[in-house]
Image: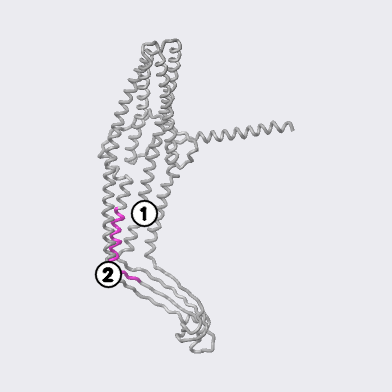
Amino acid sequence: MKLKLPLTKVTIACFILLSVTHISAKAQELITLQKAVDRALERNLTIKQALLSEALSTEDYNQSRYNKLPDVSANPQAGYNFGRNIDPTTNQFINQRTFTVNAGINAQVTLFQGGQLRNQIIQNRILVDVDKSNTAKVKNDLILSVVTQYLAILTNQDLVTAAQQQIDIAKIALDRAQKNFDVGNQTLADLSQAKAQQSTAELNLTTAQNQLDLSILILKQYMEMNPLDPITVEKPDISKLTDIRTMYDEAAVLKTALEINPDVKLAETRQAAAQQGIKVAMGAYYPSLVLFGSGNSRYSDASVRFDNPSASYPFFDQFKDNFNQSVGLSLQIPIFSRFATRTSVRKAQINYQSAGVNTQSAKNNLSKIIIQAVFDLRAADKKLANSTQTYQANKEAFNITQQRYNVGLVNALDYNTSLTNLNKSQFDLIQARYELVFRSKVIDYYLGNPITL
């Protein structure tokens, strides 16, 4: 018994160790940009809904093709008749209970319907393309959103790191101010300035951390993840992205974007479907020609053979003797439908005009976005250059100010002002660096290039 207790403790410790290891492994899940995009495309509910709409339109297209096939139906019925009635097999009045069976099969096929069947098939095929274009649009929009959020996380991570560095510097300054105050080399105002600087640095860290947590939460939402599941976002070395192209001809970018942009393709496909809808509506002006045929037979337990009334008349013999067939053509000519067809045609024409306006609006909107994106990229390039110069200047100024502050040649107010300027310029530089990357990726998106970091 004494040997079992240590073994039990060891076993429990192993289980605890394995559990902790499992939790740590789960907490260390690495999310790369490609993994974030793939997971979002796989799980996103908006995409799933778009795919379901695409499946529905495919079924509508298949059904429009099936509508060209014959329509066949059977209508068997059986029942008892009581009292005075007509025997359906003899057409004579009888006054007795009879059991009758009637069965028939009918078929019809539309030979001509003003081209509506064919035009409906074409329109439904275009509508399938509409939903496919919509699915592509949803996917592209989601990819851009994931990339945007991924870069926001990287930006906020660097801002958190910078904010933590600011706290370290502020703590050192506060410690020095406290010592100088204790020996009478600085005033209470100087000490208060140092404390305020540390409080500001801590506030900056809190703000940056909150923004980081929020950006991670939004990325999880795009990936349809549990908000409580911890993730680690891979951080590429942005400084190595030296091949970022910053100069584009907006006309060339726009020309390519108009050919591949899913928003424009979606609008154009909807316009084509609306144009086909006019032909479908106009088909109602024409006559429709239907070929039909039927076969019927019947049985009655009151029926007798004409040639031998005393003999029995079995079920299958009656069905064979009473079987009849018919075949014919039905022509329906529209004469006046209270202007319903004219109204349908006019509405279809209005829908086509509306779709044309939407197409042009999509192109105009894309043109505006492309030109703005090119301008934003150029501005981001200049902003990064200016932010780099500003940061270097403030860094040099702070180093000099810090040296003079350490020997008492600069007061606490000037020191804190220099530190504040350095901190702000560092934040601006981080944001400018990621903004340039983001703006370049936006251009890649509209050019149809894969977005990678």
Q: Which residue is mark 2?
A: 336
Is residue 249 shown left or right of residue 59? Answer: left
Pick the residue in front: 228 or 147. Answer: 228
Q: Residues within 10 Å of mark 2 (few under 14, many from 20)?
A: few
* Quarter containing the N terminus: top right
Label number found at residue 128: 1
Name the image quarter holding residue 403: top left
- How many labels sit on residues? 2
x and y percent of residue 14 in the render?
62, 33
Q: Which residues are magenta?
A: 271-290
- As helix, strand or loop, the secondary structure at mark 1 comes to helix
x and y percent of residue 170 in the render?
42, 20
Label number found at residue 75: none
**Residue at position x 27%, y 53% in the image:** 354
Q: What is the basis of the colouring in this image?
A: one colour
Identity, as a three-letter code, of the amino acid under mark 2: Phe
Identity, as a three-letter code, of the amino acid under mark 1: Val
